[in-house]
Image: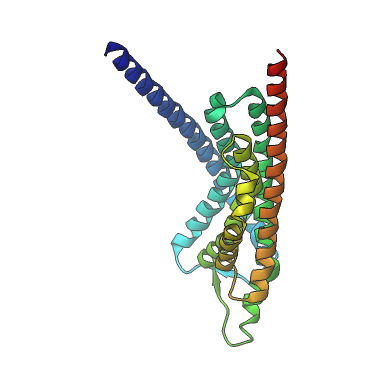
Amino acid sequence: MAEENFEANEKEMNFTGHLSELRNRLIVTAIFFIAFFIAGFIYSRDIYWFFVRDLDFQLNVISPGEIIWIYFTMAGLIAIIATVPLLAYQIWAFVKPGLTQTERRASLAYIPALFLLFIAGLVFGYFMFIEMILPFLLSLNEGMFNEMFTVDRYFKFLLRVTLPFAVLFEIPIIAMFLTSIGILTPDFMAKTRKYGYFILIIIGTIVTPPDFVLQIVVAVPLILLYEISIHLSKLVYRKKERKHEEFMASDHID
């Protein structure tokens, strides 16, 4: 009875310790987020002019609150981008004790790739918005309306398009990481391919105007990302299986 109570208390202490560690890592991440937010707030004007330099129209404000809103939006965008690799590292450090030495080295290499793919997703989404989505929407006007775009509505629409792409571009790295720790297999991704396509097409439909051509243009890269994810998952899975077979063979020889 005393031994059972000791084991229960030990498990509870371990669980509490894990929660405490997770809390501390989230606090560190939040502190860096605030620091990046302050830096982004200081340079909000420069960031704003970067986004509007190629626009053929003037953005307007219809309330004083929109002025401060754009400062917070620019600062928040920079804080999110800068915090992504730090958050990924904190998650890796939290699960590190449960990984082997090989898995630790392999998964740590995913962090810079995660950041680069996040940036690539933002760039792709921004390119789609500026070069295809926005011109298409403006072409529907055909002189019927007097165009007046507010800062608030324009940037909300811009972020609604670009941020989903930034998240979706993480699919290959997430698939590789989950495969490396044994949660995901390439066979599962291949068997659920049609469901993955369906979800990606729905997301592409949500972030693009109701134009069939535009939706196809957006959906095709997302489907390619899914196929690339399956291929990368296969590479990781085969490498993991090969190392497991080598380990079993060496153990059998000993």
Q: Position of residue 152 (x, y in %)?
A: 51, 64
Asked which quadrant contains residue 147, the reply is bottom right
Q: Which residue lies at the image location 55% right of the left edge and 61% below the top edge? A: 160
Q: Position of residue 130 (x, y in %)?
A: 68, 66
Q: Position of residue 118 (x, y in %)?
A: 64, 48
Q: Which residue lies at the image location 33% right of the left edge and 18% below the top edge? A: 9
Q: Out of 222 and 120, give the one closest to the viewer.
A: 222
Residue 90 against residue 186 in the figure, above or below: above
Q: Which residue lies at the image location 56% right of the left edge and 60% below the top edge? A: 199
Res 45 seen here: no
Q: Which residue lies at the image location 45% right of the left edge and 62% below the top edge? A: 64
Asked which quadrant contains residue 101, the reply is top right
Q: Out of 104 and 83, give the one closest to the viewer.
A: 104
Q: Out of 10 and 206, give the one closest to the viewer.
A: 10
Res 228 seen here: yes
Judged left or right of residue 76, residue 134 is right
Residue 66 against residue 41 in the figure, above or below: below
Colour style of the rendered protein structure: rainbow
Quarter of the image with the C terminus is top right
Quarter of the image with the N terminus is top left
Q: Position of residue 145 (x, y in %)?
A: 57, 84
Residue that protrudes farthest toward the left in the picture: 1
Residue 13 against residue 61 in the figure, above or below: above
Residue that protrudes farthest toward the bottom in the picture: 144
Asked which quadrant contains residue 163, the reply is bottom right
Q: Out of 174 and 136, give the one closest to the viewer.
A: 174
